[in-house]
Amino acid sequence: MIVRPKERIEDRYGSVTDLTLFPIYQSREDYREEFGVDAPWDPSQPKKHWFDPEPEKHAKKRTLPGVGVFWEYPYSLLVDENGVQYPELVPLLVPDKLVRVVNISEGKANEPQLQADGRVGTTPPFAPPVPFPLRALRPNERLERGFGGVVRVVNTDIPPEASLDEIMALLRKIAADIESLKR
């Protein structure tokens, strides 16, 4: 499935991928379906499921002396070295040689891959895919951890659903009402 950017979050909760600036190709098949050619795959480089055809429109070019040329996107989700996401937006630096291309292995975006040495993991060994740049949050949007620790986008214009405590209180009231009708 190709994940396409969304202008706004229509429901109370949305996925962080709804904020992406560019389509995310979950698999080589998705890329092939979109472009009619196989996606590039270089196991010596990190997996990357998006590309920016015109980084000069979305990012600032940065040269880090002794390191190389990078493109700095203002917003991306904070992700640690193990791929754990946090509900915080941070800048994203992408090497110039990676920004305009995808690097998609066999399987899906977050599936572990069999390494050349026989280990299971992502490449470089056990590294998460390159994070994707995001649009800025709108005034009515915020990030939070949802069920299972997954980071989600909250549309604050839509009232929250009832809490478990509210549901339990309502069920107790209904049970009491039913009990009083039996008498």
Image (spheres, helix red, strand yellow):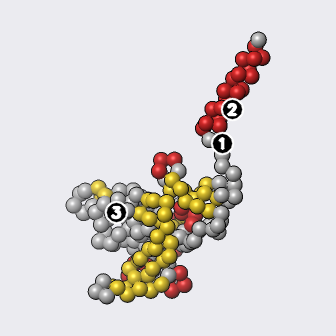
Residue drawn at (41%, 77%), measured in percent from left and top? 94
Among numbered discs 2 and 1, the one appearing first in the sequence = 1
Residue drawn at (37%, 87%), measured in percent from left and top? 63
Of tags 3 and 2, the one toward the viewer is 2
Q: Mark 1 and mark 3: span between their CA atoms?
A: 36 Å
Q: Is residue 130 above or below residue 111?
A: below
Question: In the figure, residue 170 lies in which quadrant?
Answer: top right
Among numbered discs 1 and 3, the one appearing first in the sequence = 3
Q: Which residue lies under the disc numbered 3?
A: 81
Amino acid type at circle 3 is Glu
Amino acid type at circle 1 is Ala
Q: Is residue 44 above or below residue 62?
A: above
On the image, the x and y values in percent for residue 69 come to 37, 85
Disc 3 packing (10 Å; few <14; some 14–19; many ≥20): few
Q: Mark 2 and mark 1: span between their CA atoms?
A: 10 Å
Residue drawn at (76%, 11%), measured in percent from left and top? 183
- The residue closer to the viewer here, 138 or 98, is 138
Q: Mark 3 and mark 2: span between their CA atoms?
A: 44 Å
Residue drawn at (54%, 63%), measured in percent from left and top? 17
- The residue closer to the viewer here, 1 or 134, is 134
Disc 1 packing (10 Å; few <14; some 14–19; many ≥20): few
- The residue closer to the viewer here, 121 or 59, is 59
Of tags 1 and 3, the one toward the viewer is 1
Tag 2–tag 1 contact (CB < 8 Å): yes
The tag on residue 87 is none
Amino acid type at circle 2 is Leu
Q: Which residue lies under the disc numbered 1?
A: 162
On the image, the x and y values in percent for residue 98 come to 40, 78
Q: Which residue lies under the disc numbered 2?
A: 170
On the image, the x and y values in percent for residue 66 come to 28, 86
